[in-house]
Image: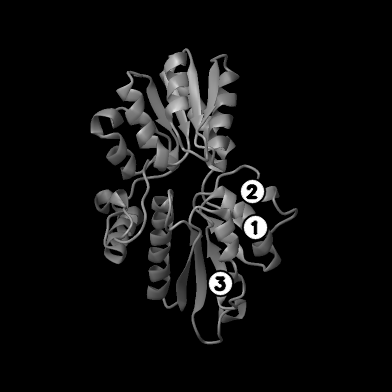
Amino acid sequence: MTPSAGGNAGGAVKLAFIGPLSGAHSDLGFAVRDGARVAVQQAKDSGVKVDLVEGDTQVDPAQASAIKGRFINDPGVVGVVGPSLSDETRTLLPDLEANNLAMVSASASDVALPTVVPNEAVFHRVVPDDTAAAAGIASYIVKEVKPHSVVYVNDSSDYGRGLADATMKAVAATGIPGQPLTIDPNTQDLAPVLANIKAANPDLVFYGGYVSNAGALVKRLRDIGVTAKFISGEGALDPGFVTTAGAPAAEGAIFACSCRFPAADAGGALGRFATQYAQINKVHPSTRTPPRGTTRQTS
């Protein structure tokens, strides 16, 4: 990273974080933003002049588009951390490509994102796409859980729908039947989904989506007597799941994640990251909650 790539000669260049810092998926946005803070501080400690600027998408692709001028029109911005969600990534990719702003997303997993702009050169991510993630989840379901039937619930997001559909397809190919259900994106009413799950009486409920509905879904399933195993992906892997579901209902839930948990006693680079993350952000990465004054929706 050099001043010739952007920024003011002899001054600091900028990286722009783009993701939700308010709204239903703000936990994800804060986690990514705060991880970026660690990387920026490490770069500064090694002598690189770089700053991190923030753009809150508010879990809304329209808002992502509305704030794009803050970084696209800033000659100091040389790259983007994010966007965090697949739908906001799809919205912004044409502008990022047109302005030669490379992006690296920690969480946008939609399979089709690399094809949004033909022959694009700026899109990067550090997570497997939904098809790859689903293959691993399906293998676990078939070999370890061995259910007779599965209900696949998605939260209507690009991520949730893509992961649930791909997992269902992979599991169904082995002969295990499945039923897809979608949480209404307008009402977020869980009652119709709960009624259908109860009627189906599955061995397993797979949830594709973010933590904002995951905990509430499990709690209410247990409340109506559904004892099916619950499996979800990394989008729902968050302390807010236990907070919303309650410990008794959350017990036994299984999450698939292409990640390692950062802990100060982990040793090596992972331990150093956890320690520095806590020092910079005043919270441990495994218990991440938004700072006072922000919105956190979990139901």
Number of the front mark, 3 or 1? 3
What secondary structure is found at the residue carrying circle 3?
A: helix
The structure residue drawn at horizontal position 66% and vertical position 49%, both measured from the top left corner, is 114
Quadrant for residue 172, please give it.
Answer: top right
> Which amino acid is tagged 2?
Leu
Quadrant the C terminus occupies: top left
Which disc number belongs to residue 226?
none
Question: Does residue 116 show up?
Answer: yes
The structure residue drawn at horizontal position 24% and vertical position 29%, both measured from the top left corner, is 248
What secondary structure is found at the residue carrying circle 2?
A: helix
Instruction: Pick whichever, 271 or 220, lies toward us.
Output: 220
Q: CA distance from mark 3 to mark 2?
A: 23 Å
Number of the front mark, 3 or 2? 3
> Which amino acid is tagged 3?
Arg
Proximity of marks 1 and 2: CB atoms separated by less than 8 Å: yes
Residue marked by disc 2:
113
Instruction: Pick whichever, 178 or 284, lies toward us.
Output: 178
Proximity of marks 3 and 1: CB atoms separated by less than 8 Å: no
Q: Position of residue 37 (x, y in %)?
A: 40, 65
Which circle's residue, 3 or 1, is located before the other in the chain? 3
Residue marked by disc 1:
93
Q: CA distance from mark 1 to mark 2?
A: 8 Å
Quadrant the N terminus occupies: bottom right
The structure residue drawn at horizontal position 51% and vertical position 74%, both measured from the top left corner, is 14
Q: Position of residue 43 (x, y in %)?
A: 43, 71
Quadrant for residue 32, please give it.
Answer: bottom left
Residue marked by disc 3:
70
Left or right of 235: which side holds 67?
right
